Amino acid sequence: AQSVTQLGSHVSVSEGALVLLRCNYSSSVPPYLFWYVQYPNQGLQLLLKYTSAATLVKGINGFEAEFKKSETSFHLTKPSAHMSDAAEYFCAVTILTNAGKSTFGDGTTLTVKP
Amino acid sequence: DAGVIQSPRHEVTEMGQEVTLRCKPISGHNSLFWYRQTMMRGLELLIYFNNNVPIDDSGMPEDRFSAKMPNASFSTLKIQPSEPRDSAVYFCASSRDRSQFFGPGTRLTVL
């Protein structure tokens, strides 16, 4: 079975500061890893995904994540936060044979202070 | 291209009534997922289909919940009878290559 742990249910940063949202996963087979973002009153949107190609993955809106197998981590970063980044972020893991079923983390709410 | 379409967007009903939520996945996607999201329980997977066949319904909370996918372009989630604790946002998502694409959700309120 796969699992995901997102460290910190709430993260607050100042506008222009580095954003770091942490995700650790557990999987007995090579995983596919995802970050999704959910803005208020909307569904989740795919930010980026890791599918065993490059370990540094770039996504939309300036976000990127690095797959570190030795640390079983897939942390999400953005060099400079913008007010529009305020949202809830979900890390998810799936494996090749799961017909697309993903296990989601509990989410991290990002607040950006002016 | 149209994304995942859900209807209705909002539903207010009284306890005991039947509720049917509808979903049209993205054309060409072969997996479909129904989720429920609440403040207390977060995002929960209720059931998912692959090639129109239910694969895992272990997340369906009770027999009051049922889901169907009669063809590749349509799915329903039915609650009968509804209860106040079913109040939540229900999302449908579809997938082709393991990336999931979510609809806008149906906000259900059961009075």
Image (tube, coloured by chain):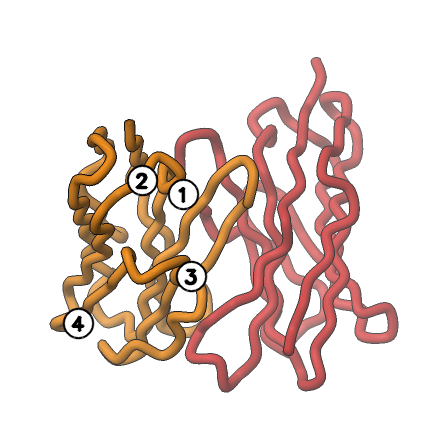
Judging by colour alone, the chain drawn in orange in this rendered image is B
For the residue pair A5 and A58, the one nearer the viewer reads as A5
The residue that label 3 is drawn on is B100
Q: Where is residue A34 in the image (x, y as percent from the top left)?
A: 58, 61
Q: Distance between the residues labelled 2 and 1?
A: 24 Å
Q: Earlier in the sequence, mark 3 or mark 2?
A: 2
Q: Residue furthest left?
A: B70
The residue that label 2 is drawn on is B83
Residue B60, placed above or below residue A112? below
SS label for mark 3: strand
Q: Distance between the residues labelled 1 and 3?
A: 11 Å
Chain ID, mark 4: B
Q: Quadrant of the N terminus of chain A?
A: bottom right
For the residue pair B24 and B77, the one nearer the viewer reads as B77
Residue A64, placed above or below residue B50? above
Q: Residues within 10 Å of mark 4 (few under 14, many from 20)?
A: many
Residue found 30% across the figure and 31% down from its top: B109
* Chain A palette colour: red
Mark 3 belongs to which amino acid?
Answer: Gln
Q: Earlier in the sequence, mark 2 or mark 4?
A: 4
Q: Quarter-wise, where is residue B40 in the image?
A: top right
Name the disc covering residue A43, or none: 1
Badges 1 and 3, same chain: no
Residue found 56% across the figure and 26% down from its top: A84
Q: Can residue A34 be seen in this view?
A: no
Mark 2 belongs to which amino acid?
Answer: Glu
Badges 2 and 4, same chain: yes
Residue B57, placed above or below residue A96? above
Q: Which of marks 3 and 4 is nearer the N terminus?
A: 4
The residue that label 4 is drawn on is B72
Q: Distance between the residues labelled 3 and 4?
A: 16 Å
Residue found 31% across the figure and 73% down from its top: B49
